[in-house]
């Protein structure tokens, strides 16, 4: 069974799993995720010698991250899943980071203005809602935030087995902070 992994929250990461093993992973730092994702997906499929029709499942990262980037990945996952009538599993980027730990953990993802933060228990359950700390708040917080941003895709694939399938039209981006026009 082939599974497509899509992560466009900041950078572009696509992978194909064959059963539980990574067949091929492609990463690209891109300022144009909207322009680069489909060509990279085509490249990935071609190098794996498979077509979209061979896919049986999609794992998509819902965010948090770039407003546009997250939406691109979700739209692509929705279209493929809907057209092929295949399963979709969703995971937040912070949830994926928490999989690296077997104890309670606070993980963070920095951007230029601050960090997205998620607090998880040892079973990777979110303890309270995700939140955003601005840079000055980061300096004054007493949390021991882990900013290691290495996602273990094998752990994500294993973890996704226990997640519910989501109907493609039910996929929504994970927004943690207000967009600039919503600020006071």
Image: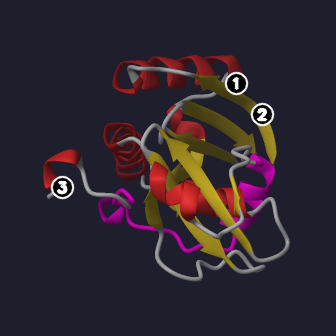
Question: Circles 2 and 1: CB distance less than 8 Å?
Answer: yes
Give the camera-side residue of 83 and 136.
136
Q: Which residue is mark 2?
A: 23
Label 1 neighbour load within 10 Å: few <14, some 14-19, many 20+: some
Q: Secondary structure at mark 2?
A: strand
Residue 171 is at least partly visible in this image: yes
Query: First in sequence: mark 2 or mark 1?
Result: 2
Q: Residue at x 54, y 41 (%)?
A: 6
Does the magenta portion include 80? no
Label 3: which secondary element: loop
Name the residue carrying label 3: 183
Which label number is shown at residue 48? 1
| Residue at figure coordinates x 36%, y 19% from the top left | 35
Q: Residue at x 77, y 48 (%)?
A: 152
> What residue is drawn where x is 57% and y is 17%?
43
Q: CA distance from mark 2 to mark 1?
A: 7 Å
Whether residues under marks 2 and 3 lie with C-beta atoms below 8 angstroms apart, the answer is no
């Amino acid at each position: 069974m082939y599974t497509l992994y899509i992560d466009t929250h900041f950078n572009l990461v696509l992978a194909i799993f064959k059963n539980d093993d990574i067949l091929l992973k492609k990463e690209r730092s891109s300022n144009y995720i909207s322009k680069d994702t489909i060509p990279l997906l085509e490249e990935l499929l071609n190098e794996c010698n498979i077509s979209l029709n061979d896919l049986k499942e999609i794992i998509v990262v819902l965010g948090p991250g770039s407003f546009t980037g997250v939406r691109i990945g979700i739209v692509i996952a929705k279209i493929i899943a809907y057209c092929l009538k295949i399963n979709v599993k969703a995971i937040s980027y912070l949830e994926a980071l928490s999989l690296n730990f077997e104890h309670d953990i606070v993980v963070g993802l920095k951007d230029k203005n601050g960090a997205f933060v998620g607090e998880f228990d040892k079973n990777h359950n979110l303890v309270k809602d995700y939140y955003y700390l601005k840079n000055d708040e980061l300096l004054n917080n007493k949390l021991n935030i882990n900013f290691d941003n290495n996602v273990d895709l094998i752990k994500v694939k294993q973890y996704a087995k226990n997640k519910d399938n989501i109907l493609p039209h039910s996929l929504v981006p994970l927004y943690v902070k207000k967009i600039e026009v919503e600020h006071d």
